[in-house]
Amino acid sequence: MKLTSKGRYAVMALVDLARFDNINPVSLRDISLRQGISLDYLEQIFSKLRKKEIVQSVRGTQGGYILNKKAKEIKLTNIFDAVDEKVKTVQCKKESKKGCNGKSTKCLTHNLWDELETHINNFFKEKSLEDLVKDNIERRV
Amino acid sequence: MKLTSKGRYAVMALVDLARFDNINPVSLRDISLRQGISLDYLEQIFSKLRKKEIVQSVRGTQGGYILNKKAKEIKLTNIFDAVDEKVKTVQCKKESKKGCNGKSTKCLTHNLWDELETHINNFFKEKSLEDLVKDNIERRV
DNA sequence: TATAAACCTGACTAAAATAGTCAAGTATCA
DNA sequence: TGATACTTGACTATTTTAGTCAGGTTTATA
């Protein structure tokens, strides 16, 4: 089980953004430099974040991105959802006709993975961008 | 983030095994047929489980595998550990010299992934093979 | 003791996912 | 009117996954 870079980068970039937000738009170039993430890759990520209305873009010189909601209202689950970072444990759900092993019944561990998904998603639903920013400020001191 | 088949199969196979254990060794061929997992792949998985002393092999005709501990004492974390299914969130830990982005400091979200790992691992530490077997019997009724 | 069942090992590979890069724009401010 | 920054989509090298394949060795039992 592994978290992909896309999800990690999305969160890192948004924390970076949230720290400078409410003053001026933050350019992807700046985020790229500060966080060491490729600019092209950031653009892909922010395109998705914009479509899900997590950020808003400001074009032109001195443009960039700003948060579209308050940091407190942006939960990790929203971010991961936007960039298609999902917790997948079993395939069996998709194929409603078949069970997990191509058999008619659920596999022996079906419930387990269900529980696990819930467990992880709960974590993501609780954490907000604000929590992360605060955590960071505290550590700096 | 995705759970790999290896981890899922390992748990499925062990639940299967645990249900028939304490009577006779269970052959991989039987598990393969019941769970729909390739025999060759099962052999790879059980080789690892045996090395970590989670199962014991019985050779010869009528041979197979038996649990090496009580089902209650085998936690999911032990199983995942044996088959190299790990929860990876950040790379930064490995490189002790550098920070997460090749910079000298921790990345903005370092603590977050740490917490997440702990959160998931707690789930795995609590669940035992016995829990899963019981859960299965209950569902059958 | 022959033989078949079962374990054991390591090399190999097709397919999918990942982590980007590259190219060619468009919009807007100064 | 340039420079800056966003926008989009196609492309690709690398890595990981999920197995397969081949060729063993061990051991119970007939």
Image: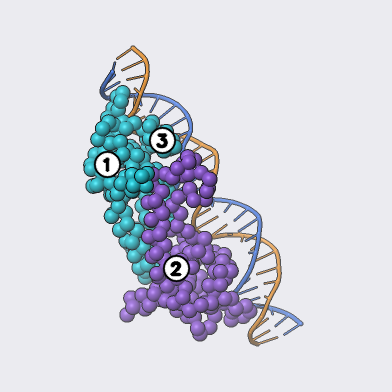
Chain colours: A cyan, B purple, C blue, D orange
Amino acid type at mark 1: Ile
State left or right for residue D15 relative to residue B110. Answer: right
Residue topped by disc 2: B76
Q: Residue at x 42, y 62 (%)?
A: B121
Q: Are marks 3 and 2 in contact (CB under 8 Å)?
A: no
Pointer 3 indicates a residue of which chain? A
The disc at residue A54 is 1
Q: Which residue is mark 3?
A: A34
Q: Amino acid at mark 2?
A: Leu
Q: Which type of secondary structure does the marked residue at label 2 adopt?
A: helix
Q: Which residue is painted at 33% across and 76% down in the image?
A: B139
> How far apart are labels 2 and 1 at the CA level?
37 Å
The Cα–Cα distance between marks 1 and 3, rounded to whole angstroms, is 21 Å
**Badge 1 and badge 3 both on one subunit:** yes
Q: Are marks 3 and 2 on the same chain?
A: no
Q: Amino acid at mark 3?
A: Arg
User: Tag 3's secondary structure?
Assistant: helix
Q: Nearer the viewer, mark 1 or mark 3?
A: 3
Q: Residue at x 48, y 79 (%)?
A: B70
The percent position of residue B30, horizontal first and vertical second, equals 51, 75
The crowding category of the residue bearing disc 1, from other C-alpha atoms within 10 Å (few below 14, some 14 to 19, many at least 20), is many
Which residue is painted at 43% across and 52% down in the image?
B89
Q: Chain of mark 1?
A: A
Q: Quadrant of the C terminus of chain B?
A: bottom left
- Judge whether C27 appears above or below A104 on screen: above
Instruction: Determine the image quadrant of residue A93.
Output: bottom left
Near mark 3 (Cα within 10 A), the count class, few <14, some 14-19 or many ≥20, is: few
Residue A44 x %, y %: 37, 37
